[in-house]
Image (tube, rainbow, N blue to C red):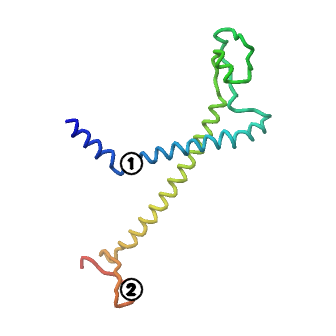
Amino acid sequence: MLRKMAGEFKTFAMRGNVIDLAVGVIIGGAFGQIVTSLVNDIVMPPIGRLLGGVDFKDLFWKIGDYKESPKVPINEHSLEEVRAAGAPVIAYGQFINILINFLIIAFCVFMLVKVINKLTEGRKKGRAARRTVVEGMPVLPVRRADQGGALRALHVGA
């Protein structure tokens, strides 16, 4: 029974769709890291500079008191230090970063789908052109060797 299940799993895992999905997940993860770096290291610093030197990852609202009074004075402008001291916060700066990441990835996926649809549409139009109908009869394009490879219509079903 275990051998049969292992064989079924091997058959399942070696299907093209499963392998394609695995490759897509791996590439998607790498692409996500690239977009995160793009947002955190390239897009957000100039925006923060334009807004007066703000670091978006440290934008937050403290919504409560510290769990225990901090023994060491903390930087009230550092999200990490305020969280470490036990204060509840709403980290809206990180949310903005993640939202921009999502929008960039969503736009890239949208563009990829547009390209795939355009390629698929071209194939469908080519198939439709080859299957034209003349007076209710399907026509197939046929190359004739005796006429230099010129296309001529072959009426099917006459």
Is residue 1 rendered to the left or right of residue 123?
left
Mark 1 or 2, nearer chain start: 1
Residue 79 sits in quarter: top right
Quarter occupied by residue 95? top right
- Looking at this view, name the residue that lies furthest to the right: 52
Tell which of 20 and 115 is nearer to you.
20
Is 95 rendered above or below residue 146? Answer: above
Name the mark nearer the viewer: 1 or 2. Answer: 1
Mark 1 element type: helix
Q: Amino acid at mark 1?
A: Ile
**Residue positioned 63% across, 10% down in the render:** 67
Q: Position of residue 34 (x, y in %)?
A: 59, 44
- Three-letter amino acid code of the residue under disc 2: Gly
Image quarter in which the N terminus is found = top left
Mark 1: few, some, or many residues within 10 Å (few <14, many ≥20)? few
Residue corresponding to mark 1: 19
Q: Secondary structure at mark 2?
A: loop
Image coords of residue 36 (percent x, y): 61, 40
The residue closer to the viewer here, 94 or 32, is 32
The 10 Å Cα crowd at callout 2, few under 14, some 14 to 19, many 20 or more, is: few
| Residue at (24% x, 76% y) in the render | 157
Question: In the picture shown, does residue 122 fall above or below 134?
Answer: above
Residue 146 horizontal/vertical position (percent): 34, 91
Can you give x and y, in whole percent of width and height, for residue 145 in the image?
Answer: 34, 87
Which residue is disc 2 drawn over?
149
Position of the C terminus, as image quadrant, is bottom left
